[in-house]
Amino acid sequence: MSDTTPILEARGLTRHFGGAANFPFRRAAPIRAVDGVSFSVRRGETFAIVGESGCGKSTLVRLLLRLLTPTSGSVYYDGADVTQTSAAGLRHLRREMQIIFQDPFSSLNPRMTVGQLVGEPLAVHRIASGKARAAQVAELLHRVGLLPEHARRYPHEFSGGQRQRIGIARALACAPRLVIGDEPVSALDVSIRAQIINLLEDLKSEFDLTLVLVAHDLALIRHTCDRVAVMYLGEIVELGDVERVFEYPAHPYTRALLAAIPVPVPAARGRRQLPQGDPPSPAAPPPGCRFHPRCPHAEQVCRETRPLLTERARGQFAACHLAGRLPAPAQSSKLAPAKGDAGRRRLAIYHRRPQPAAGFR
Amino acid sequence: MASSVKGRRSITRGGEPLLAVEDLAVGFDGLDTALVDGVWFTLERGETLCLVGESGCGKSVTALALMGLLPRPPARILRGRARFAGHELFAMTERQLADLRGDRVAMIFQEPMTSLNPAFRVGDQIAEAVRRHRPVSRAGARTRALELLKRVRIPAPERRLDAYPHQLSGGMRQRVMIAMALANQPELLIADEPTTALDVTIQAQILELIAELQREAGTALLLVTHDLGVVAEVADRVAVMYAGRFVEQGSVEQIFSDPQHPYTVGLLGSLPSLRQREGRLVAIPGAVPPPALWPRGCRFATRCPLADERCRREIPRLSSITPGHHAACFKLPLERHIPGLAA
């Protein structure tokens, strides 16, 4: 494995749920949660997966971590096929790849102390025990902005942001090289989100991590990620450098997402093209392009032939028959300066640190 | 569906506002601090006011208190009054309030699945909302329900009349809720996080629908949300809440382009921009303390970079900055406290 080998790669990854023959009953249509997804994540980058609920992004994450086995297709970690890996290989893999969950309330065992929670990976992987483990736990807690004495407390004693810090400390315990965050900040309040995003960025550079972030907040992706894959109904419809995709979105769905997201700029109100209707069920995806029933540009070919992900510009791929011919999107006002000068100037009061204690207990 | 959401809606000024809330304070048994304290605002006909703040800031409690929907006890209205179109809301009997709700004042909540009755067809639920307040026949109410489903643009409305809530998508359920809320052409619509449970493309559809129906009927909207993007999209005026108090109030332009209170400044500054990457995000330190630990003076004092002894001791009152723009802070203008910018 050289440095150019992608750290993580998906090839034709597919996962269907249900639909097994259930004699004597009729075979139900399977849910095609993830359907032929291919991409690769480069060492050291932050890669975003974005899409609305039901697009298969959480299933994709579980396939990448091998918490689910694919119906077909493979996942490669460091060039090795992990879908074929042995139990011992899997244990090694689990040290290398970690996940941070969305909900810091349900992803921590309420009967374990913070010390036990953060120390558990160290015990499972036989990295440290006894005093050495306690010392490492204290160090990890310090790194994520908690205090060593917090190790004796239980998760319910902490606020949402602090619990997410515990989840992050736990994910970092066995020194992984790849961390996947499944909506790591979407359950948090706005003022806490920025703290956690900053923490993730600091830890990424400090520990040389590769990050995969699953999110639906496009501004967050713009801020933290290098490349982005846009998913719709189990497929990747657009993939590319974040700057490129946000400034010149090629797929009508990407454009719809960018048009629909409300931005904190009253001046950006205006005319816009919204996708109509609801996304169809992944159990009965429409033929051809899966976005065609909601697409304002759909033509006959879109209804009949499934478009493939092809390169449209350097580092930008889109799965759309019309990508070369679509009119340029008209939504530049959203990309206009976000904050008034006065607000931005006054923000300087927050640079006068350090200041009150981080917690309230 | 391309339509314009730009521009002010027609607002009738002069005379009495549709809703006037004065010095509202709400407490709960077993808690010494008021969860909502000194809330003061007016709402004109056709106007949209957004109550914005993070979880636990009291924005939903404010909305529920106005509608008489807080269980009393444990909730208590400690102080204040609320006048809606000539009625003193806090002096009304439960029966009078029930006549008002769903008729002249309607509400939409965050999760449409829990607000709709799962055991009844949506057509019957809408018809019931009509018949509760209007003397119409069963058939007449059903016709009205169909009309309303068409108006909120539910596809195949004839079939949806007989659908149960679980057979509809989240976006469609919220459309049913809106149809029900608008059944009697309310003068005031109170919406508590109406799009938070929805995906962004559906959220945009619903916000546009509410704005359109509001324009048609001249309904005033009190929108409770935590999403500053939604606020920028729909509000005429904005009230920012922190730990039960209004910290700033003004027009949407004033709040977004000229924020005065340190909390508003920090909240807006902590949002990543869609436009470009801009280094580290500015983060407000710490977290909102639980109500029992709220400071005696300014409640933002535990997190404010400018807080001093006076802030911790005295409660800052909302004071006027420019017409219509108020903030509650002893440190205004903030420019005085920025190194290098101090006058």
Image (spheres, rainbow, N blue to C red):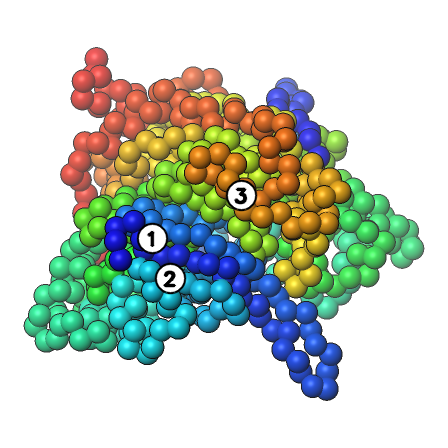
- Residues at marks 2 and 1, CA–CA distance in whole angstroms: 9 Å
For the residues labelled 2 and 1, say whether their Cβ atoms are less than 8 Å apart: yes
Q: Which mark is residue A6?
A: 1
Q: Position of residue A339 (x, y in %)?
A: 40, 26
Q: Position of residue A75 (x, y in %)?
A: 41, 63
Q: Work out whether mark 3 precedes mark 2 in sequence or the reverse, and give the earlier one.
A: 2
Q: Identify the residue shown where x is 54% and y is 46%.
A: A309
Which residue is tagged 2?
Answer: A76
Task: Pick out the residue farthest to the left.
Answer: A131
Q: Identify the residue shown where x is 73% and y is 40%.
A: A299
Task: Pick out the residue farthest to the bottom.
Answer: A24
Q: Work out whether mark 3 precedes mark 1 in sequence or the reverse, and give the earlier one.
A: 1
Locate the N terminus of chain B by quadrant: top right
Q: Is residue A151 left or right of residue B28?
A: left
The answer to whether residue A52 is above or below residue B329 is below
Q: Position of residue B14 (x, y in %)?
A: 63, 19
Q: Is residue B199 left or right of residue A227?
A: right
Q: Work out whether mark 2 precedes mark 1 in sequence or the reverse, and give the earlier one.
A: 1
Q: Badge 2 sits on which subunit?
A: A
Tag 2's secondary structure? strand
| Label 1 Cα crowd, 10 Å radius (few <14 / some 14-19 / many 20+) | some
Q: Identify the residue shown where x is 56% and y is 60%.
A: A35
- Residues at marks 3 and 1, CA–CA distance in whole angstroms: 19 Å
For the residues labelled 3 and 2, say whether their Cβ atoms are less than 8 Å apart: no
Q: Mark 1: which amino acid?
A: Pro
Locate the C terminus of chain B by quadrant: top left
Q: Mark 3: which amino acid?
A: Thr
| Residue A157 can be seen, yes or no | no
| Label 2 Cα crowd, 10 Å radius (few <14 / some 14-19 / many 20+) | some
